Image: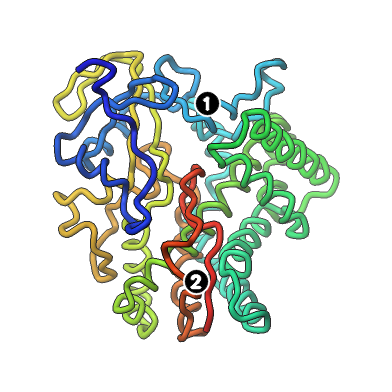
Amino acid sequence: MTDQEIPAYPMERAVKCPFDPPPELKTLQEEGPITKVRLADGQTPWLVTGYDDQRAVLSDPRVSSDTASPGYPNPAVAKDYEGDGDEPQEQRPKIGFILMDDPEHARLRRMVTAPFAIKRSEARRPAIQKIVDDAIDAMLAGPNPTDLVEAFALPVPSLVISELLGVPYADHDFFQENSKVIVNLDVAPEERTAGMRNLTVYLDDLVGQKMKAPGDDLLSGLVGRIQAGDLTRAEAAQIGVLLLIAGHETTANMIALGTLALFENPDQLALLRDSDNPVVVAKAVEELLRYLHITHNGRRRAVLEDIEIGGQPVKAGEGVILPGDIANRDPRLFPDPDRLDLTRDARRHIAFGFGVHQCLGQSLARVELQVVYSTLYKRIPTLALAGDLRELPFKHDAAVYGVYELPVTW
């Protein structure tokens, strides 16, 4: 196959099926587990579409998450995480440990593992319930119709992560706007770098404040690590940036997009709304995570040693893209995968990744989504889309998929 014959990597979902992966991905999955694709900048990495093959790659130490590794298939947003190149490497804005390999990745990640443990996340359930109830109260007291993103989906996880980190929620406009720029794939590189620098400076200032007056929050815990010599102040700020962005962007999009998917599947919405069984709610959350999979840009890796993926030899220095949305629609694991079925056992989905880079905050995200999905539709049983699905502004241009606005009425 010549470079001209290599298909372009598909990202944009069809408007008529906004919850499904791009139809071209389904075709590539049917043709075989791995194929080469062409990116906009001319790179030709391997695209892996099978569920089992993706899990194998994600757990293989011979592949790298480091954007500086030869062959790494950089999306624009990953390139800009490393700064603009006009300043020393150690001064460039970075996004924590997400784009690092072990042992450095493991060293930094374990600094913040405890606050996201299952028991700690479950202990936050009552506080999250109050945040959700308060947000619903405010929404009901406001205009009807309203934008669910602005009124509910964005404030809830923003407040949860703010309280966990020790970030003043009063600053939410600032960190939400900068986060929006950072995850937008279409903005100019200098804008994205500026957004990253704004958040890095902001978090660094917060770390400095907590060094003088620590509290009972995650950033204050990192201050203790700094004082013990386990962490630098710059590393603490970078970890803060990562957790602040990831902690509200992903969950906010799942709340809005999940609600929209339920509107489009009223039988499934009724099943969830009419049940008081926490097991039913938990299964519904897992199925929505499988069905929607909002990280639609594909996980990126670089191959460090010659390996084999799906029977195909892949050489060191070649790039790999692992789109989890199509892996979660693999019919060999999930029969009738394009149907939303809240009774399905979908726990083996890879919405949170797999291997050493599996999402740190998955336990907290699950609790948040369980509280939201079990509360919102009961409290507002007539909640419905106010508008045309085809006219909604979907986030095809962002690293995290969702809707920019979701007009609802009741």
Q: Element under label 1?
A: helix
Above or below: residue 27 compared with residue 351: above
Around disc 1, counting alpha carbons within 10 Å, would you say few (fewer than 14), some (14 to 19), or many (20 or more)? few
Asked which quadrant contains residue 353, the reply is top left
Task: Give the camera-side residue of 22 and 388.
Answer: 388
The disc labelled 1 sits on which kind of residue? Answer: Glu
Q: Quadrant of the N terminus?
A: top left
Task: Give the camera-side residue of 266 and 109.
Answer: 266
Q: Element under label 2?
A: helix
Let me know if residue 236 appears in the view: no
Above or below: residue 43 compared with residue 405: above
Residue with the mark numbered 1: 104
Which tag, 2 or 1, sits closer to the chain's start? 1
Around disc 2, counting alpha carbons within 10 Å, would you say few (fewer than 14), some (14 to 19), or many (20 or more)? many
Task: Give the camera-side residue of 281 and 330.
Answer: 330
User: Where's residue 243, x and y in %?
Assistant: 59, 46
Q: Furthest residue to the right?
A: 212
Q: Tell me, yes or no, whether the two marked residues, 2 and 1, touch with CB atoms within 8 Å.
A: no
Residue with the mark numbered 2: 372
Q: How is the image coloured?
A: rainbow
The disc labelled 2 sits on which kind of residue? Answer: Val
Let me know if residue 385 appears in the view: yes
User: Where's residue 290, x and y in %?
Assistant: 32, 56
